[in-house]
Amino acid sequence: LGTPGARTISIEVENANGCMNDVSFDVDLRQGPTDFTVYNGQPCTFDEIEFYLGSETLVDIDPGVDGIVDSTDQNTLSWTTAGTKTVTYTISNGQCNITRQVEIEVLPSPLGEITVDIGCVGQPTLVSYGGAGAASIFADYDWDDSFADAVSVSKLAGQEAYEVIWDTPGTYEIDVIVTGENGCESFIELPTITINPSPTVGFRLPATICEFVERDLFISNPDSAYQYSWDVGPNGVILASNADSTQITAVWEDIGNTNVTATASQNGCSTSRTRTIRVLNSPDPSFEAPLFCLDENTNEAVGIITYTGDNDLNNDTFEWDFDLDSAAGETAVRDTPPANSQNYVVTYKTPGRKEVSLTVTNDNC
């Protein structure tokens, strides 16, 4: 209608009979808002922007899908998702209201979280950043002073993760600023992590031990706050343990070097101590004894007890106990040849149960 001002509007009306009539009325044409200046950038998700930048009065605004209007300032907008957003807004100059729509492209910000495994003094603690579905846009990471108190920091290949060692127990703040290739940033923090003291553990072990010989092992200076466990190697067997595993009885069933490990645990932290022992070949005291039967004519039971082990008959020591009643004239005589034979002809003269035993000793066991 041109410039603002008073106008007269005339309308000529004709009905179906051809009759005509004129109607005229005056109107006051007012000037509507003219300043439509709005934000003209590409915000990142969760960034707050001032949308309307003109001189008119913002009357109403709708930020579109996943948009958020600040509760104290309707001109402050943000979006929780990326994509093209249609913003509908109404402005007024005090005389007229005008509604417009503008499209805004919202860029994705890096998403994710910091994860930390259990932290122990003097042991690597894994600190990693995990971005859900947005790894391709990550460009830069700034961990600031997160590892300033650490004594060692090692980055793992192919991922945004670090093995960090602290030498002092306590709590530490961890945060990272992640900047995407599109320039969007996210500040992600883990308020604190706790680095727990690592337990201590020790035990004594002889340099050598004989196979099949039971051995008691003890934790040195045990702490009742710790939980203890043992690993006596693939050829070792734990025969007994006290309630808190500070003492065990073990035996080894094969010769050679073997590792024995004791572990102390507390608050998810574990410390292990490993020592090596050499298991030596134990003497073999195997023998076979026949069934002894008293002869009713001689009143004697005679048989040969035969050594069946594999020990050195010349150098090893053999101590037999045939449970003889010497007063009754019972005897055990070496069955020779050979001169070093460990087979014996045994003569019993009294009925009853006999307990025969053999102890063999070599240079080591």
Image: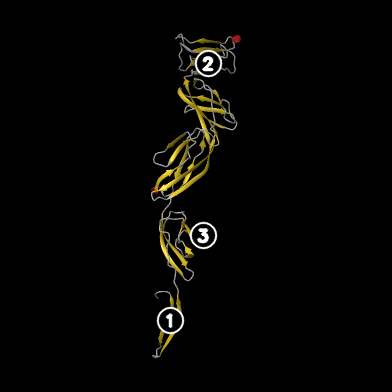
Which amino acid lies under the numbered mark 1 shown in the image of this protein?
Thr
Residue 57 at x, y = what percent? 48, 65
Q: Quadrant of the N terminus?
A: bottom left
Query: Of the residues under marks 2 and 3, which one precedes in the sequence?
Result: 3
Depth order, front residue of 178/241 = 178
From what the image shows, is residue 19 above or below residue 253? below
Q: In the figure, residue 3 lies in which quadrant?
A: bottom left
Residue 168 at x, y = what percent? 53, 33
Element carrying mark 3: loop
Element carrying mark 2: strand
Q: Are marks 1 and 3 in contact (CB under 8 Å)?
A: no
Which amino acid lies under the numbered mark 3 shown in the image of this protein?
Asp
Depth order, front residue of 244/335 = 244
Depth order, front residue of 82/10 = 10
Task: Please give the residue where the numbered disc 2 appears in the rendered image.
Answer: 359
Q: What residue is shown at x 47% (from left), y 21% (from top)?
A: 279
Q: Are marks 1 and 2 in contact (CB under 8 Å)?
A: no
Q: Which mark is residue 8?
A: 1
